[in-house]
Image (cartoon, rainbow, N blue to C red):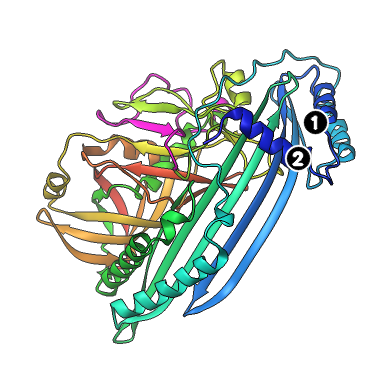
Amino acid sequence: MTSMLSQLSLTDSLFFERADAALSREAAESIVSEALAGTDDGELYLEYRESEQISLDDGRIRSAGFDTTQGFGLRAVLGEEAGFAHAGEISEAALKRAAATVSAVRAGRSGESAEPPRTSNSRLYTDVNPLGADGFEVRTGVLAEIDAYARGRDARVVQVMASFAGEWQAIQIMRADGVRLADIRPLVRLNVSVVVEKDGRRETGSYGTGGRHSYERLIVAETWKGAVDEALRQALVNLDSRPAPAGEMPVVLGPGWPGILLHEAIGHGLEGDFNRKKTSAFSGLLGKRIASPGVTVVDDGTLVDRRGSLTVDDEGTPTSRTTLIEDGILMGYLQDRQNARLMGVRPTGNGRRQSYAHAPMPRMTNTVMLSGEANPDDVIKSVKNGLYAVNFGGGQVDITSGKFVFSASEAYLIEDGKVTAPVKGATLIGNGPDALTRIEMIGNDSALDPGIGTCGKGGQGVPVGVGQPTLKLRALTVGGTAV
């Protein structure tokens, strides 16, 4: 893994030193310095991205695409205001036009420049471009093997869908004070879906895995066969499922991916912008108990090779391990530079953007509830009649009220302390702040998701990670399909 100096050298070659480059580094620095003079903060964000997607359906490659994009976003920040302009053309003329646009934020006022980001993290992932490794033919060959393997595993398999997606993103951030930062970010993902049929009934199971590494980890047989096996297992479970019960009951959440409920139900409510504007259900509660004793939640952007990790965020701030809740007490919020300054705290490295065409905002990275002391088997045994939710599909949350609705893609009844019949159509309905106080037991098995999360906010999507241990909530409303 290379140093920040090498990262800068590589991104210089992409943005300023190519034979067809229409913008020099010296010109960019001069324009940025002039455009951001008298502002509180801001930056030029340069991006180059290569991406590909290959999908197979029923033994045939249904789609394959490769795309290259590049551009810049220029932002000037003064107080609560921000001017932002972007272009898909990296040229001196385009940057001058953007500078004229964002300079209007000053409107005759002068600001005090915020201090630059501190030294960056050590590299958290490889610089190697995954799209250039192993070859397109290798990846399409693996997809064909996935199809054949899934059909050979069980005669009830009637459809197989699989896909690879990968990207290589190079960014450089240039500030008015001369500070420059760069990052090279790989990202890959494998998804497998299997449809099974029995007696006219069809059900689906899915599994995905990925992270900030090369395709090499995904194309090995152990990985893709494991993905097929898990997708098939889920499909067969759903094939035998019965309608879910409805009503208020104890709910046990499995470890790992069910942390998506934590992410949505409380994570967004702990982002700095919502709390500065006092639109979050957690506004004004720092230092107060908001969760049951034993509940500790962190957002950690420094985990090696993880999907939600970043060496530096999209403002140039190194990511960190931020404690949000400690033993049930609210300890802090997730901050970008603007909201941190306005709230009188330090940025936490959570300023993120989807691309050069988007302004940064406070976003989660890898949000995880830490392990407790309970044995997961004892958590199940403590429930006489309830629901065990192992995997989730879609969900939504209202940030202001904290109300959420999540659909469980894999769930089971708990009867007399034992996991029994699988159920279909279960939805969990509740309120994030209230749900935190209903946690009664915390397992000792905290785990991360397999690397598939994408978070939406303000029309932007960014890769994220989630995680949690087995959890028991004393009661949640379950919406089911049973009468």
Residue assigned mark 2: 15
> What amino acid is labelled 2 in the image?
Phe
> What amino acid is labelled 1 in the image?
Arg
Q: Is residue 412 visible?
A: yes
Real-space CA distance between mark 2 and mark 1, rounded to the nearest whole angstrom: 8 Å
The residue at 38%/19% (across/down) is: 287
The residue at 68%/33% (across/down) is: 9
Residue assigned mark 1: 25
Q: Residues within 10 Å of mark 1 (few under 14, many from 20)?
A: some
Magenta segment boundaries in residue numbering: 276-305
Which mark is on residue 64? none
Q: Residues within 10 Å of mark 2 (few under 14, many from 20)?
A: many
Provide residue 18's location: percent of width, then percent of height: 79, 43
Q: Quadrant of the C terminus?
A: bottom left
Provide residue 102's location: percent of width, then percent of height: 81, 31
Among the two numbered marks 2 and 1 on one chain, the one whose residue lies closer to the N terminus: 2
Residue closest to the eye, 453 or 83? 453
| Label 1: which secondary element | helix
Residue closest to the eye, 367 or 17? 17
Provide residue 50's location: percent of width, then percent of height: 65, 53
In this rendering, would 109 be left or right of 387?
right
Provide residue 74's location: percent of width, then percent of height: 76, 34
Query: Are dots 2 and 1 in contact, CB under 8 Å?
Result: yes
